[in-house]
Amino acid sequence: MKNKSLGINAFLNGLRSVLNLLFPLITFPYISRVLSVQGIGIYNFSNTYINYFILIAGLGIATYAVREGAKYRNQKKKIEKFASQVFSINIFATLIAYLLLFLSLVIFKNLNNYVTCILIFSLQILFTTLGTEWIYTIYEDYAYITIRSIAFKILSIILLFILVREPSDYLWYATITVLAGVGSNILNFVHEKSFINIRLTLNTNWRYHLKPILVIFASAVAVTIYVSSDTTILGILKNDYAVGIYSTSVKIYQIAQSLLSAILTVTIPRLAMLWGQKRWSEYNDVLTRVINTLGILVLPASVGLIMLSREVVLIIAGHKFLSSVNSLRIITWAIIFSIFAWIFSDCVLIPAKRESKVLHNTLITATINVILNFILIPSMSYDGTSLSTVIAEFSVMVMNGYSCRDIIKPIIFKKETLKNLFESIIGCIGIVIVCLLCQWGLHSMIWITIFSIILSIPMYGAILVLMGNEIAISMLNNVLNIVKSKL
């Protein structure tokens, strides 16, 4: 099978990330004005509640399937046997998730007001399993996923404006939300036959598959607790206002993080395949390229967001959320640490079958985060929550890096990598100067933001090119070649 361009895949996955983030940004201002506060509350609670059962049904299988399946993707019989066994385990976990869901609805009577909405959202459990998106990740078919995502996002927005017109229409809103995912997954299930034929099978090697799957699942549960604990503890120790301010910072932080992680996501199956096939030299080359590319993108993106935090908050959330500016400036540093922690876990430790190390490090990080929240929130409120996230992300980056030091040490301490980091830091000084000049010379937050971005990118790129940065020069040559081909 011909390898697809990592650059094109990164662009397509980035486009999909943008669409996934734009969807709530487009729809929420409309929904918040049409639906009642109670309706939005029922919708959000039901959606959050179902996510726990989606986690149970998923069982960490997607991560495991990409790691193990990538090395078989050019061997049709082996990949079909593997995929059928993993899919069968996924179906079994899905049945357990539904059983637990229905039991919870019977046992907990206080869920009666949410039953209809929960049942609508529960369709996501089955169709997430049937969607087998890990097949498309293994075969790096991001073009199909992106086109499908665009189509259903547009359809969902159209249906939203047609069907959600009254405060009582929250069930329609839930149905449309589910359709956006369910429709995509139905198409996935049909289209996957162009790659392989997956069948339910009783002949499954449970002993071989289950241990790594459960370790990855335990890590996913730990991450869920770790991610959710910030808001939960802040709500308990402070109030709804503090949660609202922090949630705004997190939303903006997640947008930036998702865009940057698009590059990382598309390399995971390639790295898993190379490691599984013991092509060490090619693996090291791709990993070096990923680290260096993200190295010159993550730092300037973070510095730019810190410099424009006030303008970004005003544009996205409005004046009433200005208190989140400092919280955003703090939590933005977590982007750098989280991206590299993810590289070390998903690109190195999991392909190397060290998922137990990932679990160990995630559990420690979750514990650190919870303890720091209880220490920092009473005195710093939402700023303390942001700071605890930064410290936790830094901790997991260090622990993950230490756990794979034998693999990454020759890459991290390469002269090329260190030179790359130094050049990126010098380039960021240029970004700071540009942003300060724009804030001094302009008064409109829109124009400050636009000119800061438009001028910072060529300033940063020019500094890298003048310092002889190979990645920047390669990117510049690619752009020039595209321009020449169009002339």
Image (cartoon, grey):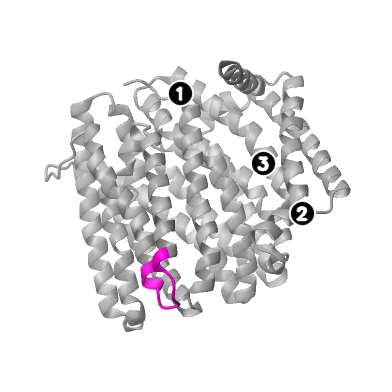
Q: Nearer the viewer, residue 459 or 236?
A: 459
The amino acid type of the residue labelled 1 equals: Tyr
Residue denoted by label 1: 283
The amino acid type of the residue labelled 3 equals: Ala
Residues rendered magenta in the picture: 162-173
Q: Identify the residue at the far right of this view.
A: 440
Q: Which mark is residue 203?
A: none
Residue denoted by label 2: 445
**Disc 2 vs disc 3: which is toward the camera?**
2
Q: Is residue 399 visible?
A: no
**Disc 3 vs disc 1: which is toward the camera?**
3
**Residue located at (84% from left, 53% from top):** 443
Q: Are marks 2 and 3 in contact (CB under 8 Å)?
A: no
Q: Mark 2: few, some, or many residues within 10 Å (few <14, many ≥20)?
A: some
Q: Mark 3: few, some, or many residues within 10 Å (few <14, many ≥20)?
A: many
Q: Is residue 166 visible?
A: yes
Q: Give percent across and percent down for residue 456.
A: 75, 37
Q: Earlier in the sequence, mark 3 or mark 1?
A: 1
Residue 37's place in the image compared with 244, above or below, is below
The amino acid type of the residue labelled 2 equals: Met
